Amino acid sequence: MPLKPRFGKVHKGLLIATLSLLVLAVFWRPEPSDAVLLPPQTLVTSAKPASKTPAAQQTTQPEASPEPPSTAETAETAETAEQNRPESVSYNIEPGDNLSAIFDAHGIPKGTLYNLLQADAEYLALETLQPGTALRFRFDAEGQLQRLTLQIDPARTVTYDRIEGGQFEYNLNTLPTHWEASVIRGDIRGSFYTSGIAAGLSKGQVIQIGQLLKSKLDFRRDLRAGDTFTVLLGREMTTTGPTGNTRVEAISLHRGRHDYNAFLYSDSNYYDENGESVTPAFLRYPTARHYRVSSPFNLNRLHPITGRRAPHNGVDLAAPSGTPVMSTGDGIVKRIGNHPYAGKYIEVDHSGAFSTRYLHLSRILVKRGQTVKRGQRIALSGNTGRTTGPHLHFELRVNHQPVNPLTADIPTSTKVPADKLSTFESRVREKLARMRVPTVMGEDYAQAPSGSVSRGGQWPASWTDHCTRPGQCRYQ
Ligand SMILES: [Zn+2]
């Protein structure tokens, strides 16, 4: 706005000085510093200072250092050049740990942590540190962090490798895995939820099954004591053991003379025995209006300075701050966080292989673990984290892999394609047969020491003839 003051020179000078200070005060945004953007507790769920406090900690920068990452980086060499630092250090996350304290304890400057978080903004892998997760730091002769390795699960390792300019590059290494299924049976006593938990299903699996079958029956009204269910539960395995990831491969709920079924198909959707989709349909857009795409999904995006691959794992929608954000499908809020680069964000787990992420939010309206419906308002969009302006970064992932949310095949209540229907039906027959007839137990169950206690009671002496009570036995 143009100013036309009728003052003398001195007044003019004073006015300009005051205005400049005001403008500075209003628009000055410091680079990320602990106080503003990185409450340590937000990085890992609970907060307890790292128990180890080596001498190296004393050489790190003061907490309140306002230096931006790039400047801090140049100071790093001098500050951490220690003769005795081992080349490689491992650390296992303990309950209450947070990244900031762990980095302090290892004498790694804040600037390095911020550069790692920047490399992780499209992935948020460092945001899921659980107790027991193994971190490995590799340093060079000058004591500079060269690589951080993060073991996500026995099949997946993420590395962050130092590249030019003190930045880091994210790489995911995956071992080959396969799925092994076991059968879980249960009977209805009380609600489906309590019956499912009693049978050995997780909370997430029970909710997912409820969402898959809700178009077929009303769980509250239609279920009776004595109804039974059978679940084919897949567990992801490496050649040496389970990764900890599971998926519901089939569900059959037996009520009177009726069976209500859902089967996972190779397109990651669920269908009934006739090939009709039972996966709740998804919305294409997370906002009521369709906003301009300000930055497209691009797995091969190149970094403008380094020239290296720097994928954009979602689509940026030019929604003004405060725009209501909707979950695009039924699901469970898996994560909520506040990241120095991704800002306030939400991740929602949907049926089977799908998940969605919403970044740079101004307000979050749901809690972790909450069940959400398609179209439910979960947040308001915003401009948090490192952005060039207000927008909504929206991601869709299938089997943990980002896909273009605006073009990907999303569940839309369709049928198995006609030319694939006979193959689908024969797979359904196989699965149903497997769910009906107990077979030989799998290795991991067979290895259970005799007398050890399973969820339903004593491990049976014979694996082939122990299912006398539904809900208390598992078959492989
Ligand atoms: Zn984006």
Image (spheres, helix red, strand yellow):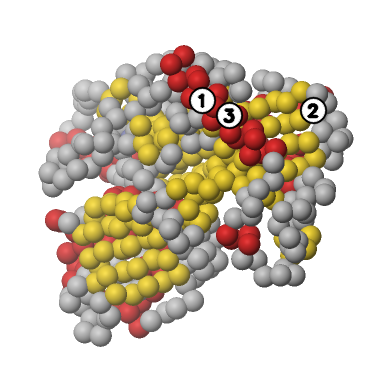
Query: Quick one: 285 or 411, which is closer to the camera?
Result: 411
Q: Would residue 244 be found to the left or right of residue 198 on screen?
A: left
**Total marks placed:** 3
Instruction: State the image coordinates of residue 316 (x, y, percent, origin top left).
Output: 33, 29
Marks 3 and 2: CB-CB under 8 Å?
Answer: no
Q: Quadrant of ligand 1?
A: top left
The answer to which of marks 3 and 2 sits earlier in the sequence is 2
Mark 3 secondary-structure assignment:
helix
135 w.r.t. 342: above or below:
below
Q: Amino acid at mark 2?
A: Arg
Q: Amino acid at mark 3?
A: Val
Q: Would residue 7 be found to the left or right of residue 436 on screen?
A: left
Mark 1 secondary-structure assignment:
helix
- What residue lies at 47% left-to-right and 72% top-to-bottom? 50
Q: Residues within 10 Å of mark 2 (few under 14, many from 20)?
A: some
Q: Amino acid at mark 1?
A: Phe
Picture quadrant where residue 126 is located: bottom left
- What residue lies at 59% left-to-right and 18% top-to-bottom? 274
Question: Label 3 vs label 2: CA separation?
Answer: 19 Å
Marks 3 and 1: CB-CB under 8 Å?
Answer: yes
Mark 2 secondary-structure assignment:
strand
Q: Find disc 3 in the rendering and name its residue.
A: 428
Instruction: State the image coordinates of residue 169 (x, y, percent, origin top left).
Output: 24, 52
Query: Quick one: 199 or 463, which is closer to the camera?
Result: 463
Q: Find disc 1 in the rendering and name its residue.
A: 424
Instruction: State the image coordinates of residue 95 (x, y, percent, origin top left).
Output: 55, 66
- What residue lies at 55% left-to-right and 24% top-to-bottom? 425
Query: Quick one: 332 or 342, which is closer to the camera?
Result: 332
Question: Label 3 vs label 1: CA separation?
Answer: 6 Å
Q: Find disc 2 in the rendering and name its residue.
A: 255
